[in-house]
Amino acid sequence: MQHAIKTLGFDDAVRALSSRGRDGDDDCRVASFELLLRDRYSLQRILTPCRGDTCEHDECFDLASYAALNARASEPLCPVCSRGLPPARVHVDEMVVRLLAAAPGAPAVELARDGR
């Protein structure tokens, strides 16, 4: 069964990134972090950066890894957090697409929570 993969637009991705850095206390939030550009499952550089629309992690996974991991699974899972993740809830992260293009060959990038 094939599903169309949705795209999380750049501005929406930056807003989501900023909100994931909050812990409920505006005085206590992570200012910056390292975002890996390698897929945790395949250990290769991400080609199509995806995440689940209900996942709470910053890290993306490669679409090919998601497909390989879940090829025979009765319940598809996120390769990063192992939460249930049906294909209809997977989307390409446009912000990470841009980061991959801007940092060819880099294993990771340092990002501020506001996406800069």
Image (cartoon, grey):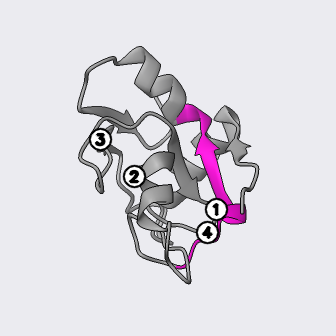
The Cα–Cα distance between marks 3 and 2, rounded to whole angstroms, is: 9 Å
| Residue occupying image coordinates x 61% and y 69% | 54
Q: Residues within 10 Å of mark 2 (few under 14, many from 20)?
A: some
User: Is there CB contact under 8 Å for labels 4 and 1?
Assistant: yes
Q: Residue at x 70, y 42 (%)?
A: 7
Amino acid at dot 1: Asp
Which mark, by number, is residue 54? 4
Question: Disc 4 and disc 1: Cα gap in Å?
Answer: 4 Å
Q: Are marks 3 and 1 in contact (CB under 8 Å)?
A: no
Residue 73 rendering spot, x and y as whole percentages: 50, 78
**Horizontal placement of 70 versus 40: left or right?**
right
Residue 86 image position (x, y, % from top left):
64, 71
Amino acid at circle 2: Glu
Residue wearing tag 1: 53
Question: Mark 3: which secondary structure?
Answer: loop
Label at residue 38 = 3
